[in-house]
Image (tube, rainbow, N blue to C red):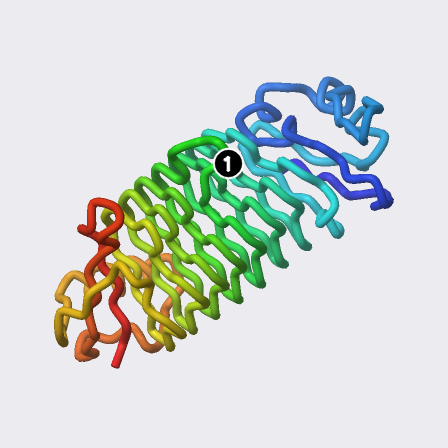
Amino acid sequence: MLRLILKSNGPIPLEADSIRPNVLQTLSLMDIRKLPIWQGRNCGLIEDFFDLDGDPTDGTIELLGDCSNIKRLGERMSTGTLIIRGSAGMHLGAGMQGGLIDVYGGAEDWLGAGMQGGTIRVRSHAGDLVGAAYRGESRGMAGGTILIDGHAGDEVGAHMRRGTIAVAGNCGDFVGISMIAGTILVGGDLGKSPGAGMKRGSLIALGKMSNVSPGFTASGEYQPNFLGIYTKFLKSKDFPLPKLTPESRYIRYVGDRVSAGKGEILVRI
């Protein structure tokens, strides 16, 4: 395991897309120390901001310290494990293709934006636009799994194409906006206008839904068998949602009619 111990965390964010296991495991400690990290318009080196020890060859990286002001950690990583013993900044795991990111704190906006594979676990709260598409892009998350132990902000799963997002707490407004496919499970309450512009996919709310988007129609009560698969899957990830039980019944809403109209929102009764 390679350990990177943060020396300081100043007011200007760092951009550290070079810190990803599939890059570092092929390099010596000397080469890793000389990798670039941007701070505003200035380019520094990893050794300017981190103390390093350990061996990177096993593909496991551990960051110690408050990394909430460090952007783009694990961006485009394809293999290995990135453990963050603190919080993480914006764009964590963006474009991720494989491997595991485990955050023992919170994460800022754009967590897993456009990710294609792998697993991200955040053991506290997350910001806005989890698994979303960047502005101007038509597709967001296209695969993989994002698990959030706390709450999440607005536009979770915006333009999501595939994969699974599970949030143990509440979500903000516009969850699943313009969702193309995939599954979002929310253990708490939904904010305003969930599923607006939704084409396909499933949005499951185990708490309350504050309002239904106008393009959705209620289609009765329903006991979905497929949720048993997600129950087993989440338990295998040590992420159980207590209210996700086989005997639970849901009100099913179908929409959004302003789009393809083949999506569904399931609200637990």
Q: Which residue is mark 1?
A: 134
In the picture provided, is 70 more to the left or to the right than 203?
Answer: right
Q: Is residue 28 above or below residue 60?
A: above
Residue situated in front as seen by the camera: 206 or 195: 195
Q: Position of residue 30 (x, y in %)?
A: 76, 20
Question: Hey, which quadrant is residue 31 in on the image?
Answer: top right
Q: Position of residue 155 (x, y in %)?
A: 47, 53
Quarter of the picture holding the N terminus: top right
Q: How many marks?
A: 1
Residue situated in front as seen by the camera: 218 or 79: 218
Disc 1 crowd rating (10 Å Cα; few below 14, some 14-19, many 20+) is some
In the picture provided, is 178 more to the left or to the right than 123?
Answer: left
Q: Which residue lies at the image location 80% right of the left edge and 24% below the top edge?
A: 45
Q: Which residue lies at the image location 42% right of the left edge and 34% below the top edge?
A: 98
Q: Position of residue 43 (x, y in %)?
A: 81, 22
Question: Hey, which quadrant is residue 188 in on the image?
Answer: bottom left
Q: Which residue lies at the image location 37% right of the left edge and 68% below the top edge?
A: 240
Residue situated in front as seen by the camera: 13 or 74: 13
Q: Which residue lies at the image location 52% right of the left edge and 66% below the top edge?
A: 151
Question: Hey, which quadrant is residue 140 in on the image?
Answer: top left
Q: Is residue 201 above or below residue 207?
A: above
In the picture provided, is 108 more to the left or to the right than 204?
Answer: right
Quarter of the picture holding the C terminus: bottom left
Q: Amino acid at mark 1?
A: Tyr
Q: Position of residue 174 (x, y in %)?
A: 43, 57
Mark 1 residue element: loop
Q: Is residue 114 above or below residue 108?
A: above
